[in-house]
Amino acid sequence: MSEDISLIENRLRSRFPGAVLTVKIFRDELTICIDRDSIVRVLQFLRDDGELAFDFLTDLCGVDKTSLEKSNSFEVVYHLYSIKRNHRVRLKVKIPALKPTIGSVTGIWKTADWHEREAYDMFGITFEGHPNLVRILTPDGFEGHPLRKDYPLKGRQPNSLRDVYRKVKR
Protein backbone atom coordinates (compact mmCIF):
# COMPACT_ATOMS: atom_id res chain seq x y z
CA MET A 1 0.00 0.00 0.00
CA SER A 2 2.83 2.44 0.77
CA GLU A 3 4.09 1.99 -2.81
CA ASP A 4 0.68 3.10 -4.06
CA ILE A 5 0.74 6.11 -1.74
CA SER A 6 4.14 7.18 -3.02
CA LEU A 7 3.08 6.68 -6.62
CA ILE A 8 -0.06 8.79 -6.20
CA GLU A 9 1.72 11.57 -4.31
CA ASN A 10 4.68 11.71 -6.69
CA ARG A 11 2.55 11.73 -9.84
CA LEU A 12 0.39 14.54 -8.50
CA ARG A 13 3.32 16.63 -7.27
CA SER A 14 5.16 16.31 -10.56
CA ARG A 15 2.11 17.03 -12.68
CA PHE A 16 0.56 19.78 -10.49
CA PRO A 17 3.36 21.23 -8.33
CA GLY A 18 1.42 24.34 -7.31
CA ALA A 19 -1.90 22.60 -6.74
CA VAL A 20 -0.80 20.17 -4.02
CA LEU A 21 -0.97 22.11 -0.76
CA THR A 22 -0.45 19.39 1.87
CA VAL A 23 -0.13 15.62 2.01
CA LYS A 24 -1.00 13.54 5.07
CA ILE A 25 -0.76 9.83 5.66
CA PHE A 26 -2.62 8.38 8.62
CA ARG A 27 -3.10 4.63 9.11
CA ASP A 28 -2.10 3.98 5.51
CA GLU A 29 -4.70 6.42 4.21
CA LEU A 30 -3.53 9.18 1.91
CA THR A 31 -5.15 12.63 2.13
CA ILE A 32 -4.10 15.39 -0.23
CA CYS A 33 -5.25 19.01 0.05
CA ILE A 34 -5.63 20.62 -3.36
CA ASP A 35 -5.97 24.22 -4.47
CA ARG A 36 -9.58 25.06 -5.35
CA ASP A 37 -8.80 26.36 -8.81
CA SER A 38 -7.00 23.14 -9.78
CA ILE A 39 -9.34 20.50 -8.38
CA VAL A 40 -11.24 19.67 -11.58
CA ARG A 41 -8.01 19.28 -13.60
CA VAL A 42 -6.45 17.18 -10.83
CA LEU A 43 -9.47 14.88 -10.62
CA GLN A 44 -9.56 14.52 -14.40
CA PHE A 45 -5.89 13.52 -14.32
CA LEU A 46 -6.43 11.01 -11.51
CA ARG A 47 -9.15 9.30 -13.53
CA ASP A 48 -7.36 9.34 -16.90
CA ASP A 49 -3.79 8.50 -15.86
CA GLY A 50 -3.16 4.83 -16.65
CA GLU A 51 -1.00 4.18 -13.60
CA LEU A 52 -3.48 5.74 -11.19
CA ALA A 53 -6.80 4.87 -12.90
CA PHE A 54 -9.19 6.26 -10.27
CA ASP A 55 -12.30 5.16 -12.07
CA PHE A 56 -14.73 5.39 -9.14
CA LEU A 57 -15.81 8.45 -7.16
CA THR A 58 -16.80 6.70 -3.96
CA ASP A 59 -18.05 9.78 -2.18
CA LEU A 60 -18.12 13.54 -2.26
CA CYS A 61 -19.23 15.51 0.76
CA GLY A 62 -19.11 18.93 2.36
CA VAL A 63 -17.71 19.90 5.75
CA ASP A 64 -18.52 23.10 7.61
CA LYS A 65 -15.28 24.14 9.34
CA THR A 66 -16.34 27.64 10.26
CA SER A 67 -16.46 27.03 13.98
CA LEU A 68 -13.75 24.37 14.16
CA GLU A 69 -10.80 26.30 12.82
CA LYS A 70 -12.10 29.86 12.88
CA SER A 71 -11.12 29.87 9.26
CA ASN A 72 -14.56 30.79 7.93
CA SER A 73 -14.34 28.07 5.32
CA PHE A 74 -16.02 24.94 4.10
CA GLU A 75 -14.33 21.90 2.71
CA VAL A 76 -15.28 19.60 -0.14
CA VAL A 77 -13.93 16.07 0.28
CA TYR A 78 -13.56 13.60 -2.59
CA HIS A 79 -12.98 9.89 -1.96
CA LEU A 80 -11.62 8.06 -4.99
CA TYR A 81 -11.05 4.37 -5.60
CA SER A 82 -9.33 2.55 -8.42
CA ILE A 83 -11.03 -0.75 -9.19
CA LYS A 84 -8.20 -1.69 -11.54
CA ARG A 85 -5.35 -0.84 -9.13
CA ASN A 86 -7.16 -1.37 -5.81
CA HIS A 87 -5.97 1.85 -4.21
CA ARG A 88 -7.69 4.84 -2.62
CA VAL A 89 -7.08 8.52 -2.08
CA ARG A 90 -8.91 11.34 -0.31
CA LEU A 91 -8.72 14.88 -1.70
CA LYS A 92 -9.78 17.95 0.25
CA VAL A 93 -10.42 21.44 -1.04
CA LYS A 94 -11.04 24.50 1.12
CA ILE A 95 -13.60 27.00 -0.11
CA PRO A 96 -14.66 30.27 1.53
CA ALA A 97 -17.90 30.13 3.54
CA LEU A 98 -19.02 33.50 2.25
CA LYS A 99 -18.98 32.26 -1.35
CA PRO A 100 -18.99 28.46 -1.26
CA THR A 101 -18.52 27.63 -4.92
CA ILE A 102 -16.39 25.07 -6.69
CA GLY A 103 -16.33 23.45 -10.13
CA SER A 104 -18.57 20.47 -10.79
CA VAL A 105 -17.03 17.09 -11.56
CA THR A 106 -20.16 15.61 -13.14
CA GLY A 107 -18.29 15.64 -16.45
CA ILE A 108 -15.68 13.27 -14.97
CA TRP A 109 -17.91 10.90 -12.96
CA LYS A 110 -21.67 10.74 -13.52
CA THR A 111 -22.20 9.72 -9.90
CA ALA A 112 -21.04 13.19 -8.83
CA ASP A 113 -24.47 14.43 -9.89
CA TRP A 114 -26.20 13.13 -6.74
CA HIS A 115 -23.27 13.75 -4.40
CA GLU A 116 -23.01 17.39 -5.47
CA ARG A 117 -26.76 17.88 -5.13
CA GLU A 118 -26.58 16.50 -1.60
CA ALA A 119 -23.70 18.85 -0.67
CA TYR A 120 -25.66 21.71 -2.20
CA ASP A 121 -28.78 20.82 -0.24
CA MET A 122 -27.09 20.22 3.11
CA PHE A 123 -24.36 22.92 3.01
CA GLY A 124 -25.31 25.34 0.24
CA ILE A 125 -22.15 24.61 -1.72
CA THR A 126 -22.63 25.64 -5.34
CA PHE A 127 -21.04 23.42 -7.99
CA GLU A 128 -20.44 25.56 -11.06
CA GLY A 129 -21.39 23.75 -14.27
CA HIS A 130 -23.63 21.17 -12.57
CA PRO A 131 -26.43 20.21 -15.01
CA ASN A 132 -29.26 20.11 -12.44
CA LEU A 133 -28.26 21.65 -9.13
CA VAL A 134 -31.51 21.38 -7.14
CA ARG A 135 -32.29 20.10 -3.65
CA ILE A 136 -32.34 16.35 -3.28
CA LEU A 137 -33.01 15.52 0.39
CA THR A 138 -35.18 18.33 1.74
CA PRO A 139 -38.75 19.05 0.61
CA ASP A 140 -39.79 21.89 -1.67
CA GLY A 141 -39.85 25.17 0.19
CA PHE A 142 -37.21 24.15 2.71
CA GLU A 143 -35.15 27.12 3.81
CA GLY A 144 -31.50 27.02 4.79
CA HIS A 145 -28.97 24.22 4.77
CA PRO A 146 -29.34 21.80 7.71
CA LEU A 147 -25.72 20.69 8.11
CA ARG A 148 -24.29 24.18 8.43
CA LYS A 149 -23.10 25.11 11.89
CA ASP A 150 -25.29 28.21 11.91
CA TYR A 151 -28.50 26.27 11.21
CA PRO A 152 -30.85 26.46 14.24
CA LEU A 153 -31.88 23.13 15.71
CA LYS A 154 -35.54 24.03 16.40
CA GLY A 155 -38.27 26.17 14.94
CA ARG A 156 -36.76 27.06 11.63
CA GLN A 157 -39.25 25.68 9.10
CA PRO A 158 -42.83 26.86 8.52
CA ASN A 159 -45.65 24.77 9.99
CA SER A 160 -46.59 23.40 6.57
CA LEU A 161 -43.25 21.56 6.36
CA ARG A 162 -43.70 20.13 9.84
CA ASP A 163 -46.92 18.59 8.55
CA VAL A 164 -44.99 16.92 5.70
CA TYR A 165 -42.80 15.07 8.19
CA ARG A 166 -45.53 14.30 10.73
CA LYS A 167 -48.39 12.84 8.67
CA VAL A 168 -48.54 9.67 10.77
CA LYS A 169 -50.57 10.17 13.95
CA ARG A 170 -49.52 8.25 17.00
Image (cartoon, helix red, strand yellow):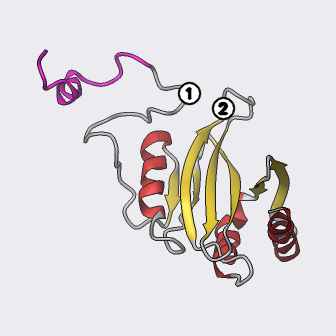
In the foreground, 103 or 61: 61
Which of the labelled discs sits on residue 66, or is there none?
2
Give the mark nearest the N terminus, 1 or 2: 2
Residue 56 in picture, x, y percent from top left: 56, 68
Depicted 48 relative to depicted 89: above or below: below
Q: Which residue is mark 1?
A: 149
**Residue at image x 62%, y 56%?**
78
**Residue at image x 43%, y 62%?**
113
State the image quarter where residue 52 is shown. bottom right
**Residue at image x 84%, y 66%?**
9
* Residue range highlighted in magenta: 153-170
Depicted 84 relative to depicted 153: above or below: below
Labelled pair 1, 2 in contact (Cβ < 8 Å): yes
**Residue at image x 55%, y 59%?**
58
Residue 92 in picture, x, y percent from top left: 70, 52
Disc 1 marks which amino acid? Lys
What kind of element bears circle 1? loop
Which of the labelled discs sits on residue 113, or is there none?
none
Residue 4 in picture, x, y percent from top left: 80, 68
Magenta part, dominant SS: loop
Disc 2 marks which amino acid? Thr
- Horizontally, residue 102 falls left or right of residue 121, namely right
Q: Residues within 10 Å of mark 2 (few under 14, many from 20)?
A: some
In the foreground, 53 or 140: 53
Q: Quadrant of the N terminus?
A: bottom right
Residue 53 in picture, x, y percent from top left: 66, 77
In the foreground, 133 or 113: 113
Q: Quick one: which residue is furthest to the bottom in this view? A: 50
Q: CA distance from mark 1 to mark 2?
A: 7 Å
